[in-house]
Image (cartoon, helix red, strand yellow):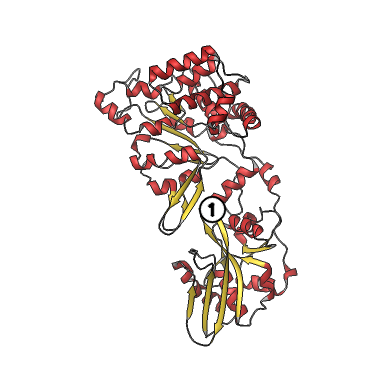
Amino acid sequence: MSVCVLSAALSGIEAMVIEVETRVCAGLGYFIVGLAGEAVKESLFRVESAIGTCGFEMPRQKILISLAPAGVRKEGAVFDLPIALSVLAASGQLAPEPLNDFLFSGELSLNGRLRPVKGALSMAIEARKAGMKSLVVPKENANEAAMVSDLAVFGFDTLTAVVGFLRDTTTSQPVVIETKTLLDKDKPLYAADFSDVRGQEHVKRALEIMAAGGHNGLMIGPPGTGKTMLATRLPGILPPLSLQESLETTRIYSVAGQLDAGGLIRERPFRAPHHTASDISLVGGGPVAMPGEISLAHNGVLFMDELPEFKRRVLEVLRQPLEERQIAIARASYSVSFPANFVLLAAMNPCPCGFFRHPDRKCTCTPLAIRNYMGKISGPLLDRIDLHIGVKPVNFQAAKTAENSALIRERVTVARNIQLKRAGVCNALMNTAMIGDLCALGKIEQQVLSQAMVQHKLSARSYERILKVARTAADLDGEKKIGLPHLAEAIGLRCLDKDYLSK
């Protein structure tokens, strides 16, 4: 007898429906065909133990399992539950008809307990696209999968509970989650607040521009000036996550296996990889396609401290996602794309010892050492960073009490809403045509920008990015046109690296 049960496999953050077809016939041995990975090939051993422990019988015949489409590689333990159910149905211990109404996913322990799987939200989205009405997952994944509307999601702890439910589907009710209510209820407060930071008003202003326009930034300054402290507070002034953004981010964390049980991501992500990170850990990939740090920072902030200490190859892989806001990964066995719409905030010292141009400490580095240190950051990468922010030491006794993050976030949200209403995207994502329409300059402003381009030898990309930053500064001030102060501010936030590189 042959039985077909539907499941799902992940490819990047996308899922696709997989048919688990099982046939029990004369002969001996267990066989799985259809480009099954090691974890899938081992599933029958887990299934055999779980079936026996739960009081059922594993057929002592030939069991052939086909995973279709056969040309798609399948990885992970998500097929344990559908394989177990198909074996029970093919051996006559479970009626096959109820299986047609559900898509199943779940890993089995040896005692028949269901363990959570990665990517339940993506599987639920694919199940709805495929026209399925119901989904069965481990109980720990039920709240996550139930975020998808128009899909009945059932969560169970054991194989026995799933079989009992299939024999009488009136015994359990689907999990119901009001996603919009969950997003609005008890809105999280960021623990790190700008009111803790005294002084550095020009840096706070630059970070406010970054947050309002979605721009990338680089802070350059000596140790102890608060660069990391400022960076950790940037997510708290970004506009609140929309429902769509929250679901996108939750989906990525689910696939990566970093989602709390049933949790909806409600805060902007903040990722801070160590400078020893590899390029694969940053962009994603590996034997099985997994999102990297830049995708885990999607809709949030990627903070790279001690930027010159990162390997050159690691830094260069940032160039494509900074432009395209996604990362395409091609390997011999797969080709996937991960979203990577993040704000990059980097920090670095001005020289190896850290005290170049420090007002009180003497720099011990030679001019060559300083140039080599700054030269670790390539020109093309610097060109893709909109704001270059100088951070100077602060006299803590003279520093005044600062405004809190909530007040800054209100201004940022107003400016961002202006941008979305005007162009449908934040200023950092404007294309060339939008820049021409929305960033027009007066005659004096055009002359000032032309002089700055020549004086600082800026690229055409820098020209556009200066206009974008100036447009954001004007939006924060509630101005419809870019004025000379906005343009001057944008130019000043663009040319700092030239100062250091020219010494």
Determine the residue positioned at 50% across, 19% down.
489
Indicate left or right for 2 with 203 as reference: right
The quadrant in which residue 226 appears is top left
Determine the residue positioned at 54% across, 21% down.
401
- The amino acid beneath tag 1 is Ile
Considering every residue shown, the one lying at the far right of the view is: 170
Q: Would you say residue 396 is visible in this rendering? A: no
Up the image or down, 95 lies above or below 321; here it is: below
Image position, residue 415 (x, y; %): 62, 27
Up the image or down, 483 lies above or below 420; here it is: above
Q: Quarter of the image containing the N terminus?
A: bottom right
Considering every residue shown, the one lying at the far bottom of the view is: 26
Up the image or down, 156 lies above or below 329; here it is: below
Per the image, the residue denoted by label 1 is 13
Q: Quarter of the image containing the C terminus?
A: top left
Up the image or down, 320 lies above or below 22; here it is: above
